[in-house]
């Protein structure tokens, strides 16, 4: 009997171990969310349009990780979403947010197939950050994290669909320590015969030698149409090649030098008329970082971006400023289209770009006129200075930025614009209190005749105060102020970076968004936030305000 009991315990433990091993083959994770919003519109003389809106949704994203072998993983994210107000499940949708196969070949080469996240350098492939924030309060950054999640904005990566290979050559005991390789091809868009749009691919590679002196890189990206995928009328292609490097500060007495330089060529081949249009240009960006003076992190750099330098994957804007929310779309008895503002950009159904294309998208100069398309913005030259003090006082971090840029060539005139930007941010944590503050002031000017003159200024202010009331309960609050005044020319560019529409536009506006609420944490995986927002917008044509109440529940598992 004793032996039978021992054998039974052994078999049970063996079965349990095997079951555990099998469980490791499949793992589940995910997110769940409920978001409820009530908005109340206040505008003078409006007896025809609704002034209240209630909407929201609940969703669950179930992630499944399958390991068929020790060197292979299959990852998929499945979504179920229910729009509140649907009739007995009529508003329920099902979808797949991600499907990726990844693995390692012979313990040397990593591969990814399906939905992949890609980033190289700010001049080749780089998803630029938001323009409507300076140093956002927690109550607003929590909401912005939902936008990033929904649009696959992960740091500065682009979500693409294709295949990627990564591998490295290692050289022990050598000045050349390692060479990293990154090669990929993605499907940018499918062929559409009705609009004469051919199949388009996006390919690239990056080779980065790492040495004792520093790291250097050769990078190439290529956006191109595939011939004969439809009855071709026009074929587009763009190549960008860059060389980058960072030199270790140990070799230059506390100075860390960095640079990137390169050129691009864009071609449009008209197969009907047999015409070929091309543009090409170059850029350079060089600078240094140091901590030598007064305990400051100092960064100074100079750049020159040619007017026709094009790298579509690095010259993008996240927010579609031309989009219009469906909430309170028309206001007043005159049926005026409501101007969109920072409340809409954070909470309402406006559109964000989660893919880049061959043309420069429309931007809003009152948010960013100096470098609207990121560091690779074409037709810019100038200097940038950044100062950061991490411990001015205990728990206090201060950051100061200054930028002085100008156009290289004038647009529609020989006169050139000049740009000045001053930006600062402060973070302070003391006991139960956390304070955030940021301000950005931007000035654009162009001299000349009356029709050439441009004079525009804008200011963005962010502020936030969080108080930990109890271990799991926080009071959170914030404010955003945005104002602008002056005039500018809004530009629409063609594929070859030529402005073909210039619209004179005048600004005299101010908008304020303030919010306060409570956030209750249920452990480290879920939170319940209730908040109240007060928003006001005024310009030369119309004034309105919106009061909003939100309940947001988030769960990670």
Image: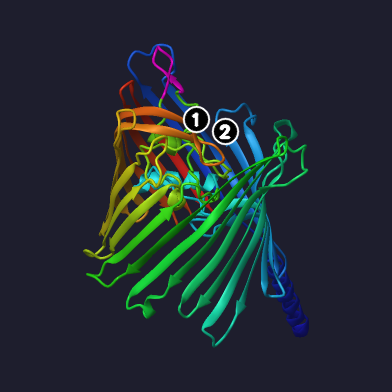
**Residue at left offset 50%, top offset 26%:** 326
Disc 1 residue crowd, few under 14, some 14–19, many 20+, Cα 10 Å? some
| Residue 98 position within the rendered picture, expressed as x and y whole percent measured from the top left | 64, 50
| Residue 126 position within the rendered picture, expressed as x and y whole percent measured from the top left | 51, 54
Residue 539 left/right relative to 309: left
- SS for dot 2: strand
Asked if marks 1 and 2 touch (Cβ < 8 Å), the reply is yes
Q: Is residue 394 magenta?
A: no
* Residue 463 visible in the snapshot: no
Q: How is the image coloured?
A: rainbow
Residue 516 left/right relative to 219: left
- Which residue is tagged 1? 55
Number of marks drawn: 2
Residue 8 left/right relative to 58: right
- SS for dot 1: strand
Res 479 quadrant in image: top left
Residue 203 left/right relative to 481: right
Magenta residues, dominant SS class: loop
């Amino acid at each position: 009997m004793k032996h039978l009991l021992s054998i039974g315990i052994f078999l049970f433990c063996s079965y349990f171990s095997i079951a555990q091993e099998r469980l490791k083959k499949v793992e589940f994770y995910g997110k769940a969310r409920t978001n409820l919003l009530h908005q109340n519109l206040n505008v003078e003389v409006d007896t025809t349009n609704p002034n209240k809106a209630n909407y929201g949704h609940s969703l669950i994203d179930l992630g499944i990780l399958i390991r068929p072998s020790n060197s292979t993983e299959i990852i998929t994210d499945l979504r179920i979403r229910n729009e509140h107000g649907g009739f007995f499940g009529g508003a329920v949708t099902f979808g797949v947010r991600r499907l990726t196969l990844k693995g390692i070949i012979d313990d040397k080469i990593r591969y990814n197939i399906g939905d992949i996240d890609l980033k190289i350098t700010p001049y080749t492939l780089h998803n630029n950050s938001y323009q409507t924030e300076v140093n956002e309060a927690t109550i607003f950054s929590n909401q912005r994290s939902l936008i990033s999640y929904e649009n696959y904005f992960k740091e500065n990566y682009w979500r693409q669909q294709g295949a990627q290979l990564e591998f490295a050559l290692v050289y022990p005991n050598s000045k050349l320590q390692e060479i990293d390789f990154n090669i990929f091809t993605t499907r940018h868009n499918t062929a559409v015969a009705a609009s004469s749009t051919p199949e388009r691919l996006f390919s690239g590679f990056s080779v980065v030698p790492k040495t004792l002196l520093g790291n250097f890189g050769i990078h190439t990206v290529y956006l191109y149409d595939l011939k004969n995928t439809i009855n071709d009328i026009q074929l587009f292609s763009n190549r960008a090649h860059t060389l980058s490097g960072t030199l270790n500060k140990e070799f230059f007495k506390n100075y860390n030098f960095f640079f990137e330089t390169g050129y691009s060529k864009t071609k449009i081949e008209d197969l009907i008329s047999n015409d070929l249009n091309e543009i090409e240009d170059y850029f350079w960006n060089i600078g240094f970082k140091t901590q030598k003076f007064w305990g400051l992190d100092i960064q100074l750099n100079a750049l020159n971006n040619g007017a026709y330098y094009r790298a579509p994957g690095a010259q993008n804007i996240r927010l579609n400023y031309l989009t219009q929310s469906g909430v309170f779309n028309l206001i007043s008895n005159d049926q005026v289209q409501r101007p969109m503002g920072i409340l809409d950009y954070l909470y309402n159904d406006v559109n964000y770009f989660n893919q880049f294309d061959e043309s420069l998208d429309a931007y809003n100069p009152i948010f960013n006129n100096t470098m609207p398309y990121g560091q690779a913005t074409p037709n810019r030259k100038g200097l940038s200075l950044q100062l950061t003090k991490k411990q001015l006082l205990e728990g206090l971090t201060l950051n100061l930025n200054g930028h002085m840029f100008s156009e290289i060539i004038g647009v529609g005139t020989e006169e050139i614009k000049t740009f000045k930007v001053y930006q600062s941010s402060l973070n302070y944590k003391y006991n139960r209190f956390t304070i955030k503050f940021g301000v950005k002031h931007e000035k654009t000017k162009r001299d000349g005749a009356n029709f050439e003159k441009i004079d525009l200024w804008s200011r963005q202010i962010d502020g936030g105060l969080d108080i930990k009331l109890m271990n799991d309960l926080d009071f959170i609050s914030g404010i955003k102020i945005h104002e602008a005044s002056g005039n500018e020319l809004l530009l629409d560019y063609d594929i070859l970076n030529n402005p073909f529409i210039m619209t004179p536009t005048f600004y005299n506006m101010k908008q304020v968004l303030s919010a306060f609420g409570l956030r209750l944490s249920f452990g480290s995986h879920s939170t319940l936030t209730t908040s109240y927002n007060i928003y006001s917008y005024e310009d030369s044509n119309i004034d309105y305000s919106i009061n909003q109440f939100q309940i947001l529940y988030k769960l990670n598992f």
